[in-house]
Amino acid sequence: IDFTNDPLLQGRNFSYLDTQLKRLGSPNFTDLPINAPKCPFATFQQDGHMAFVNPTGRVNYEPNSWPGEQGGPREDPVNGFQSFPNAESGEKRRLRPESFADHYSQARQFFVSQTPIEQKHIADAFVFELSKVDTPAIRARMVANLRNVDEDLAGRIADGLRLDEYPDPSVPASAPITDLPPSLALSIVENAAGTFEGRKVGALVTDGADAALIAELQEALAAEGAKLEFVAPQVGGFVANDDTLVLADQKLEGGPSVLFDAVVILASAAGSTALAEHPAARDFVADAFAHCKFVGHVASADPLLVAAGVAERMDEGFVALDHADGVATFVTACRDLRFWDRELAAALALP
């Protein structure tokens, strides 16, 4: 089946061949099972890098004088490849539609379709990347471009960069469309699965941790399709309050909270007091807080929460596991993956 004269398809025929040759370093990409025809097909091509099959005969060229099957595959003038003799008339032009000049409308629709936390992350990402640009004029030029996308976005970035002057919008080649409706399909948060399945909770534990609470938490997470891993001061494990030795999955210094989707602090009173003096333990809690993760805790963990600087800032993303239905409440909350209100509240508190 021959290719049509569609210009886009013709361009791809050229570039895709080049891509296959570069990726595999060989013309034998047609022999890959994913690319090979299902019907019997023979060529004279053989050898070379990544050759899957080779002809069995002696000849590998055409025309040749070998008879029959010894002569290798032959063309079939009746049933073989033929191009369709399509009659053409008129002018053939290379044109671009006017929409090619619209550089901002799709970006605007994408931004307005995001939730507030996603919009904040987009603005923060621009501020971070542009802060690495040494030339202030280039930073201002980018903000000028972004004013054609969304004024609020551009304003946040200008504030984050602390521009001396708010630049005028750049002149667009085509005026952006400003009334495209938001699309929930473009938001990751709006399309979250609503489950904690496949996720992992890191439990910071010490000797004397509540064995019954641990068992309840393990059972609830297993029912959710999630996993509980123990992070202890020593990788040899910890002795729970029922005198059971439980092996740890991670040593504290090698198991930071960034490895987990949510965390629980199950340290005993004595263990929490000791961990309060441990920098890695304080970082475990402080980083989980900073990354807006859900934090389950017990009352005996208070000394560590105070030392980590989060005791007075605990919000609805913190769940007391030793309260009635605490474990079930924690697992249900974790289905949201992050407590984004914490980040939004911190942004509002900035001067």
Image: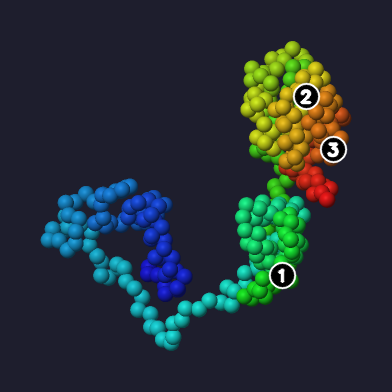
Distance in Å between CA atoms under marks 3 and 2: 17 Å
Q: Is mark 3 on a helix, strand or loop?
A: helix
Residue at the image position 13 percent from the left and 58 percent from the top: 66
> What residue occupies the far top of the structure in this picture?
243
Q: Do the residues labelled 3 and 2 touch (CB within 8 Å)?
A: no
Q: Residue 313 carries which label?
A: 3
The one nearer the camera, 128 or 139, is: 139
Can you say whether 286 is above or below 16 in the image? Answer: above
Among numbered discs 3 and 2, the one appearing first in the sequence: 2
Discs 1/2, front: 1
Percent from the top left, x then y, of residue 319?
Answer: 82, 34
Q: Nearer the viewer, residue 280 or 340?
A: 280
Q: In the rendered image, which quarter is residue 164 located in?
A: bottom right
First in residue order: circle 1 vs circle 2? 1
* Helix, strand or loop for disc 1: loop
The residue where tag 1 is placed is 168
In 3D space, how far apart are the residues under numbered discs 3 and 1 (Cα atoms)?
A: 40 Å
Q: Disc 3 vs disc 1: which is toward the camera?
A: 1
Q: Mark 2 points at which residue?
A: 276
Look at label 3 and name its amino acid. Answer: Arg
Q: Quadrant of residue 133?
A: bottom right
